[in-house]
Amino acid sequence: MDICDDEMVRVVLHMASDVANFGCIPIFVTTSPRVPSEGIEPHVDTETSFRANMSGPDNDEEVLPRTISLQQYYSPIHDNYDNIDDNGVTLQDVGATVFPITTSLKQRYSPYHNNDFRDNDDFHNEIEGDNVCAEPSNNTRRVTRFNNDGDDGGAGPSNVPSFQHEDECEDNTPMNNRGNRPIPSMVRSRRRIDPLTSLAPTLPSNMVAPSFVGSCDSDDISVGKLFVEKNELILQLRKVAFRDKFDFKIVRSTTTRFEAHCCSESCKWRIRATRSSNEQNVPWVVKRIDNVHTCHNEVLVDGRHQVRSRVVGHIIAEKYTQDKRIYTPNDIRADMQQEYGVQLTYQQAYRAREVGLEIVRGNPAESYNLLPKYSHVLTTANEGTVTHLEQDGDGNFLYYFVALGSSIKGFMHYIRPVIVVDGTHLKGLYRGSMFVATCLDGNNQLYPLAIGIMDSENNDAWERFMMKLHEVIGDRPELVIISDRCTAIRRAVLKVFHNATHDVCFYHVKGNIKSQFRMCKALWDEFEPAFINAAKAYGHEEFKRQLEGLWMIHSGAADYLENNVGTCNWARSQFQGRRYNILTTNIAESVNAFMREPQKFPVTHLVDHFRKTLQQWFYDRKIVAESMTTRLTTWADEIVTERRTIAERMIVRPVSPHRFQVISGGLKEGLVDLQKRTCSCRVFQLDQLVCAHAIAACLTHWVDFINLCSDFYTTESLAMAYAQPVEPVGDVANWEVPDEIQEMQVYPLVEAPPPGRRKELRIPSTGEDVDRRTVRCGRCHELGHNRKRCKNPIASTRS
């Protein structure tokens, strides 16, 4: 901002007095003698603050620029204001309002809002139709700038108009020899002087102080836009060039000046940006831009400068704001071709995708260093949340555990005591493994309890995860932990949870049988349903009958199930505890499924995605629970209603006041004890939901069978399980973190990422059914074989 008269001085002093809004404002002041142009006598008004060089040296003498001190001239103890240097400004001049102001400074006098500012710039002078970069002589450079750009490459006087009327400017303002432009009152200085605040006058009511233009957040670049770094300016310029299909070249790039021209020699498009110094936090400001192309815009082709992965990555970054959005490199190629007419290679699109993901989700290495701060904010915002971060001696990441306080509180009182644990591999840059502990609520919905991020899946990692989980939930009565047949999990459960019972997923047992015994399809189709019925059987007699059938189908597999695996580990009827209706690890696999895409995220973003998911689930499910009109949850009420329909056709015969014999033609008869809440079919006591026999006994003797169901299935318990909301952590810039946590450094895993693309598809488990891709022959185009194995005759095309 150029200071060319008294009113502009008043504006600057007013801004300097308002430190809270404008900060410390540097003012650069340089003095030099006025040198009138040859043949033109300067017009000097001695009554204004532009003091003539009447007492200065002769113009023929060589005078070096000298720096003046504002404190010397504006000091409150300075009595003789008239003895100030001839090129200075007195307090009397500052205090006097020379001319009235009818337009606000922001509207009329800011160079950022006046496009005519660039017409008087010396960056690209047009002399007689030729494009010449003219450098002005030092004897004509006399200007004072606010937040000056430090331009030593030929920036001429500003075009900021005087606050005088036009006719008065023509009569009173001194002129120079460069197009009869007004001579400013001072020239720039190489010394930074602190602004005075004690004598800053009050800004008149009809004037508005100029406001700073914020950092550019649009695709357009205009005069006055600020950029924090030069790279940000270049990136924004490349995005504009990519969109408008032109190319540019950087002709000058220093620590304080940036210039770029259109690649076409005949084109007049160019841009210049500067900053006052090369110190940190000093922004770059666009001083001039000739935004009209006189060349012929051509469609960008492969290899042009602006077709860069970094530029395309910034353009497509908004596509990845939604965590579940799948935007592949081929999608990027198609969009760039359709919207910009640019053909990208697959490698360019893939690298652009990586850039866009890093912009939205952060750098993978820096994400590890953000974990301590994130953990502090998370535990502060969510009461009862437990986090644990462990590093090695060199500060490298090893283990991380998090359990939200809302989940812990709900599980301890309102969720069935069955936990399913499982692990999965992360697909990010530094790989690693993720462990999950999940439950089911009373409405048979997923209820994640905790997650852990480890360097790898091994015995030590599972033991540490179980230890932290035990610290969270303690020794809860009748606790059951279900997993696959991983020996590391079983060893960790038996070592840490002394009062818990461990069980395995029968689905994984079925996969082990299929891979180990290699049955033919006909034999397997007979063995599989018999095994599933044996695993799901409630009664001992039913289980024995199904097991005998397995022995008849395949004795080797039956012996493996009974003696190697153990029937108590996979059969519900033989299990020592109560598994309710949870027989597999499907719920943990479901958590891995909705975390499949976040498994590629940086570690902090991954954890926050888990938190955001629970935040949404807790909110939605609490509303649903409060809107339920039945005493049991929707899922439990449907089961009980279906069983009641069957119970209405049963015959009930009392045995004692609390025991009843229930007979039915379609079902096996049962002996019900309402006081002990048991039935001979064992459905009542294993699921804690009334069976059809118990409902029939209750209907006959006017007993409310809903009260016999476990409290875990009630609507009230469901609402209480989601009563405590999951709080957000807010923006990173607003985090309040103690100094000791702020100084913590967490480095990524020691093991370097392997080369090549990261695998995203999961390796199937042993014996798992996989949908094989159907092969089509490229020779005869039939299914079931490839070209190499094709034996079909091909009709000759010869005539």
Image: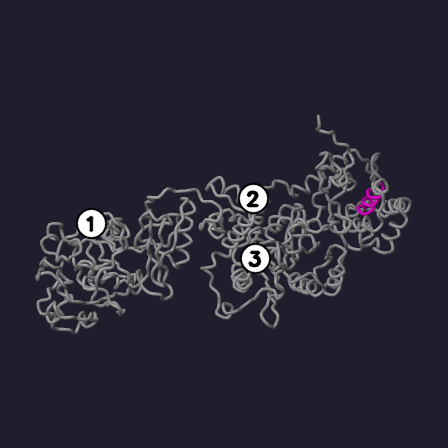
Location of mark 3 (residue): 602
Badge number at residue 330: 2
**Residue 757 shows in this picture:** yes
Q: Quadrant of the N terminus?
A: bottom left
Q: Quadrant of the C terminus?
A: top right
Q: Position of residue 383 (x, y in %)?
A: 55, 60
State the residue at coordinates (58%, 44%).
Answer: 626
Location of mark 1 (residue): 103
Q: Would you identify the image quadrant in which residue 156 lies?
A: bottom left
State the residue at coordinates (46%, 63%).
Answer: 736
Q: Is residue 745 above or below residue 243?
A: below
The Cα–Cα distance between marks 3 and 2, rounded to whole angstroms, is 23 Å
Indicate the secondary structure of the residue bearing disc 1: loop
Q: Is residue 535 magenta?
A: yes
Magenta residues? 526-537
Indicate the secondary structure of the residue bearing disc 3: loop
Which amino acid type is shown beneath numbered disc 3?
Answer: Pro
Observer-nearest residue: 236 or 179?
A: 179
The Cα–Cα distance between marks 1 and 3, rounded to whole angstroms, is 53 Å
Observer-nearest residue: 399 or 41?
A: 41
Judged left or right of residue 4, residue 761 is right
Q: Determine crowd level at label 2: few under 14, some 14-19, many 20+ residues with C-alpha closer than 10 A.
A: some
